[in-house]
């Protein structure tokens, strides 16, 4: 059950992060979010029992180290992402990477300087009393994550009042995820202190992620926290995805009309029509189409079907008269007008093709 939960949450975060990374290559933004999700997914996959058994064949307790390192990288990326979407990116811009680098170095040094690490599942509770390096290891890990989680929670709490819609819902989930993460870290501190005070500490076995309070703190809460983080970081992107889909549909709809106008009026074509983003390509296509409609003497008050017929029936040679000037329309109204004309033009093209076909 626990293995299924860890691998399921890990793969969900991993695939979401890869999807975000593909988008980063197209848009150039959101790299921190992609790294965070991939690191979270890797941490949970490394931490599953089956993976730890395999990793321990390479080096004792290697899975525990890899999952802890990935979790710290994820915490750094999440903090950076939350700062970006909340407009507080410059806050702690220099201290964040320095703190992460120091914490990662301490974990690596203390881990590989510890002898007698267990094979299989990396459980250190019985070793804290005899291996001070592991105490430093778990202290560094807990303190770094604690500060990172608190930073994420504070930024989310401060920003949530001034936000709205999908961003506000995402920040609310991040705030809730921070609460679960703090509870997990508090339980980890208590468990470490108890292990240090006990002569023969024994790690309690968990039959399920919520089978007992220690299991809930140690297994259930981290999984719930990661799920909330993944969903919370994904929700604000939904409106942008919807807008991108509308832009793509508009581009496809404009293509025949724009192609006809640029063939008829070659001077309206831009030197470099391909922009780095779909929105820029749409704006370029709209600008070219509008210029072509002006040269074709299509006025804003002309109904879309009439405008489409006028464009289709343009004479072979351009009219030498000066085209009329028209006022610039708001973007949304301009998009609606061009879409309507483009639809009407497509219908006319389809009708003409049906008539000419034998």
Image (spheres, rainbow, N blue to C red):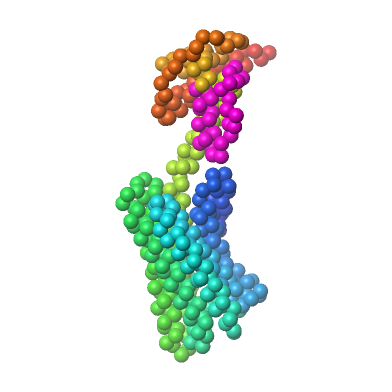
Query: Which residue is at the far bottom?
Result: 199
Which residue is found at the position 41% from the left and 16% from the top?
301
Which residue is found at the position 62% from the left and 16% from the top?
353
Which residue is found at the position 50% from the left and 54% from the top?
33
**Residue 64 location in percent, x, y?**
55, 72
Quarter of the rendering containing residue 158:
bottom left
Based on the picture, tell me whether residue 282 belongs to the magenta stretch: yes
Quarter of the rendering containing residue 119:
bottom right
Q: Is residue 237 visible?
A: yes
Up-down: is 333 above or below 100? above
Query: Which stretch did the figure color magenta?
Result: 263-290
Up-down: is 245 above or below 93? above
Q: Is residue 37 visible?
A: no
Front residue of this view, candidates 215 and 320: 320
Front residue of this view, candidates 312 and 194: 312
**Residue 111 location in percent, x, y?**
56, 77
Which residue is found at the position 40% from the left and 51% from the top?
87
Horizontal arrangement in the rendering, residue 166 relative to residue 316 (left or right): left
Query: Which residue is at the far left?
Result: 161
**Residue 110 location in percent, x, y?**
55, 79
Front residue of this view, candidates 52 and 111: 111
């Amino acid at each position: 059950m626990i293995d299924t939960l860890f691998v399921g949450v890990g793969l969900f975060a991993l695939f979401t992060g890869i999807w975000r990374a593909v988008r980063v290559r197209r848009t150039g933004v959101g790299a921190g979010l992609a790294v965070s999700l991939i690191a979270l997914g890797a941490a949970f996959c490394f931490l599953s029992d089956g993976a730890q058994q395999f990793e321990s064949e390479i080096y004792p307790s290697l899975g525990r180290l890899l999952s802890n390192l990935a979790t710290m990288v994820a915490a750094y990326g999440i903090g950076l992402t939350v700062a970006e979407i909340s407009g507080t990116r410059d806050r702690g811009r220099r201290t964040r990477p320095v703190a992460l680098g120091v914490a990662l170095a301490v974990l690596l040094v203390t881990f590989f300087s510890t002898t007698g690490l267990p094979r299989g599942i990396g459980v250190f509770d019985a070793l804290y009393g005899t291996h001070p390096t592991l105490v430093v290891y778990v202290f560094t890990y807990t303190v770094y994550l604690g500060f990172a989680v608190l930073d994420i929670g504070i930024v989310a709490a401060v920003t949530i009042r001034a936000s709205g819609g999908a961003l506000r819902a995402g920040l609310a989930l991040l705030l809730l995820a921070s609460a679960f993460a703090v509870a997990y870290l508090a339980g980890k501190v208590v468990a470490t202190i108890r292990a240090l005070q006990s002569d023969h500490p024994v790690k309690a076995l968990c039959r399920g992620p919520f089978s007992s309070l220690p299991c809930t703190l140690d297994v259930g809460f981290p999984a719930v926290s990661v799920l909330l983080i993944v969903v919370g970081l994904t929700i604000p992107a939904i409106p942008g995805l919807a807008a991108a889909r509308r832009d793509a549909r508009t581009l496809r709809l404009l293509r025949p009309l724009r192609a006809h106008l640029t063939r008829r009026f070659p001077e309206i074509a831009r030197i470099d029509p391909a922009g780095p983003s779909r929105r820029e390509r749409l704006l370029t296509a709209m600008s070219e189409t509008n210029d072509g409609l002006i040269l074709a003497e299509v006025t804003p008050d002309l109904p879309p079907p009439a405008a489409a017929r006028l464009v289709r029936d343009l004479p072979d040679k351009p009219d030498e008269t000066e085209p009329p000037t028209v006022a610039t329309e708001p973007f949304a109204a301009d998009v609606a007008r061009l879409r309507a004309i483009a639809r009407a033009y497509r219908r006319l093209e389809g009708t003409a093709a049906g008539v000419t076909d034998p």
